[in-house]
Image (spheres, rainbow, N blue to C red):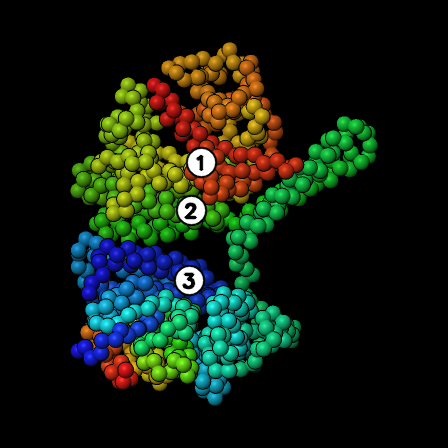
Amino acid sequence: MKASKKEFIAETEDILFGCQQLLLEIQDTYQASLNPDTINALFRSIHTLKGLSGLFGNHEITDLSHALESLLDDIRLGKINITEDVVNFLFKNLDILNSAVDGVKEDKEYDLKEHINNIKTFRESWKEGNIGPDIKGIIDDSILKVLSEYEEHRLKANIKNGKGIYLLKAIFELSTFDTSLEDLTKKIKSEGELISTLPVSAHVPEGSIGFNLMFASNKQLKELQKEIADNIEVLVRSKQAVTEPDKKPGQSIKSQAATVRVDIDKLDRILNTIGELTLAKDAVRRIGIEVAEVHTHSPFVRDIHKISQSLERKLSELQKEVLSIRMVPIGQIFSRLAQVIRRYSREMGKEIVITLYGEDTELDKSLAEEIVDPLMHLVRNSIDHGIEPVKERLAKGKKEQGCIILKAFQRGNYIVIEVTDDGRGIDIDSVMKKAIEKGMIDPSAGVEGELINFIFAPGFSTKDVASEISGRGVGLDVVKEKLSSLGGFTDIHTKKDEGTTFTLTLPITLAIIKALLVKVGNEKFGLPLTAISETVAVEHKDIQTIEWKDVYYIRGEMLPIISLAKIFGIESARNDVSFAVVVGFGKRKLGLLVDEILEQQEIVIKSLGEYFKGLSGFAGAAEIGRHEVILVLDIESIIEKSLIRQENYS
Amino acid sequence: MRKDVTTKSILLVEDSATTRALIRAIIDEMDDFNTVEAGSGFEALKLLPTQEFNLVITDVNMPDINGLELINFIKNNPRYKHIPLIIVSTERSEEDRKRGIALGAMAYITKPFKAHELQEAIKQAITDEGI
C-alpha cells in the first residue's frame, strides 16, 4: 500500500516549501497582528505531511511531523504564545524535515528520535495553559457540538478578546451555493473572523441548502447588518466600544501598529491610473506647445505651461510614493537564502560562512518574489559545484570553511545582486570544449568574457560546469530567462581555483519606465531608457562590414550595428543618415539603427497577453497618448539574438 | 466475506488528493464498492443528493466545512440520516473523536492507519446498518 517514492518526495517537498512560506509570514507578522489562518494553515500542512509519510511508511518523518503537529496545535489553540524562539525552533524543525525528505531521496535513514524528544521538551517548557471562558450556556449546544477543537478555541479566544459573536443564517440554491457562499464569507472575513460554517437542511426548501455562519467581529450589529446582511443575530455582545472610540482614552483599543497590509494588485491599479494620468499630463503639455505656436504671448500659454509643469512634479512625486510602498528590503530574501545555505551545506558536509552586504537595498515586492528562485538556484549551485570539499580546499591552501557572499546594491535604476563563492571556479576550457561540441561557437573566435556566458545557454551542461542543480534538473538557462523576462540580465566572473561571482542585474521596478520613442519606417517603438547608453547619428557610408558584421567606429571603438528595420522586416525610410541607439554593456554593446529619434516618455508597459507569449524581442506594449499604442522592445533578447545571428554568419 | 453482490456506493470526502487516492485504493481492494470522491465538504454537499450512498467516509480538518459539520448535516437530514459514517482523520484530538461519535459517526480512524483497519471499519459500518 505504498505510494510511489517519487510522488511522495514531490508532494512532501511542495508541502515543506509551503510551510516555509507560511512560517516566514508568521515571522514577519507575529509581533503586529498574526492571522490565525496562517498558523492554522501551517498546522494543516504538517498534519497532511504526517498522514502522507504514514501512508508512505516512513515512521521517522511521521513521528517527527506528529510531534511538530502537536506543538503547532498548542500554538494554534493558544496554549503556547508565539515568540522569536518559537519561530526559530519551528524553522529548525522544518530544516530537519527537509533533510529527512532528502534522505528518502537517497534511501538514507535518519534517526530523528532526538529531535522528536526535543520537540516534546520544548512543548512542555512553553506551555502556559490558556483556559478560555466557559462557553457552555452562552452559545447554544447545537452549535458547540459540531465545532472542532480548533474552532472552539477560536470562539473562546474571540470572546475573551471582547469580540462580539454573531450568527448569520443564509439559504442558497444547492447547485450554486459554493460561489454565493464564498461571496458571503468574503464579506464576513472583511468584518471579522469566520469561526464555523454549518450546513443545515431543516426548514430549507427542496433544492436549496442552508448555512449557519458563526463569526466574531468587534463591530456592532447595526454596522454588520449594513455591511453583510440583515438577518444576523447576536450570540455574544461585543465588549469593545468601537463606536465610541474616545470613551476611555487611557485604554485605547487603537491598534499599536501604524501599518496596513495592502494587496499588491491594488497598488498595481494605482500605478496604472498614475500611468494614465501621466498620459493626460503629456497631452496638456502638447496642447500648451501647440497653442504657443499660434498665440506666442498669450497669458493662457504661460498658465498651461505652469500647470503642466506642476502636474508633472506632483505626478512624479505620487508615483515615487506608490513605488516606495511596493519596495521591500532585499534582506528578507537574503535571510531565506542564508537558511537554505545553512541547511544545504550541512547536508553536503561542507562548512560555509555566509556574509551578507546591502541587505537594506530595496526592490519592488513583485520583483523580489520573482528573483527568489533564481537566487536560490545560484546559491545551491555554489554549494554543489563551487565550494570544494575540505580536503581539496586545504590542499589548495584555502581556508577550511567555504565562503559565500550575497551582496546587493543599487546602480542607477537597477539593483545588482551578486552571489560570490570562493570555490574552484568554472573551468573555461571545458566550457569552451562543450560550446564547440554543441556548435555554439567557432573554435577560432572565442573571448573569455563572452564564452563563459554559454553556461547560461539552454541545454548547456558539462559535468565540470555548474549548469545543473543536483536533483532539480534545471539549468542556468532558466535563471537567465527569468532575469530577461524581468528586464534584467546575468553575468559571470570566474577564476580557476579562486571562485565565481554571478551577477544579477534587474530594474528596481517594472511598473513605469522611461522610454525613448523611435521610428523605423512607419512604425514607432519604445526602448527602455535604462538600457541605452547613448545615441549617435550614423552616415550609412561610414558603416563597414567586417566578417559579415556591420560595424561602425565610434571614438575609435568598433560598435556592431544592426538595423531594427532588418530585424522586424520593415522598410526603412532612410538611406543616407540613420541613428544608432547604443545599448548593452562591454562586449555585449550593440548599436540599433533607427530612422528617427522622437522623444522620451514615461510609459506603463502592459503585457502582450497569452496569444503573443512566445514572441521574443518585445517586453510588451504601451500607450503613448492619442490612443496610439507602440511595442516596447526587450533589449536583452535583441542583443542575445544578434549575437547568435552573428555567430551563425561567421 | 462477500454477502451481497449488489454494488454499494461510498462517498469519500477528503481534501488531500494523495490521501484520497490511497483510501480509494484500500476500498478498491474490497469487492463491490463504488467510490465517489469529493475534494471538499462543499463538493460532498453537492454530491449527496445526486445518488444513493451506502457509506460516507470523511476527514475532519478541511478548508470549507469541517467533517463534524458535514456529519451533523447528514444526520439531521431525513433523506440522509440512515447513511453510516466513518471519520478518517489526522487529528489525534480526543475532543474531536468524542464529538464525531456523539454526532453519529460509526468509527473514528486516525491516520496513519493500516489498510485492514479501514476495511474492517467499512464492513462493520455497513453490516451494522443492516444493508
Q: What residue sits 25% from the left and 31% below the top?
A: A427
Q: Nearer the viewer, mark 2 or mark 1?
A: 1
Image spot of residue A541 (x, y percent): 51, 11
Q: CA distance from mark 3 to mark 1?
A: 40 Å
Q: Nearer the viewer, mark 3 or mark 1?
A: 1
Residue B84 visible somewhere in the drawing = yes
Residue type at the position of mark 2 = Glu
Q: Secondary structure at mark 1?
A: loop
Q: Is residue B50 above or below residue A390?
A: below
Image spot of residue A160 (x, y percent): 49, 79
User: What residue is shown with label 3?
Assistant: A26
Q: Secondary structure at mark 2?
A: helix
Q: What residue sits 70% from the left and 33% below the top?
A: A286
Q: Are marks 3 and 1 on the same chain?
A: yes
Give me the disc on residue B66: none
Residue type at the position of mark 3 = Ile
Q: CA distance from mark 2 to mark 1?
A: 21 Å
- Residue A519, by quadrant, is top right
Give me the disc on residue A615: 1
3 or 1: tag closer to the N-terminus: 3
User: What residue is shown with label 2?
Assistant: A370
Q: Residue furthest right?
A: A298
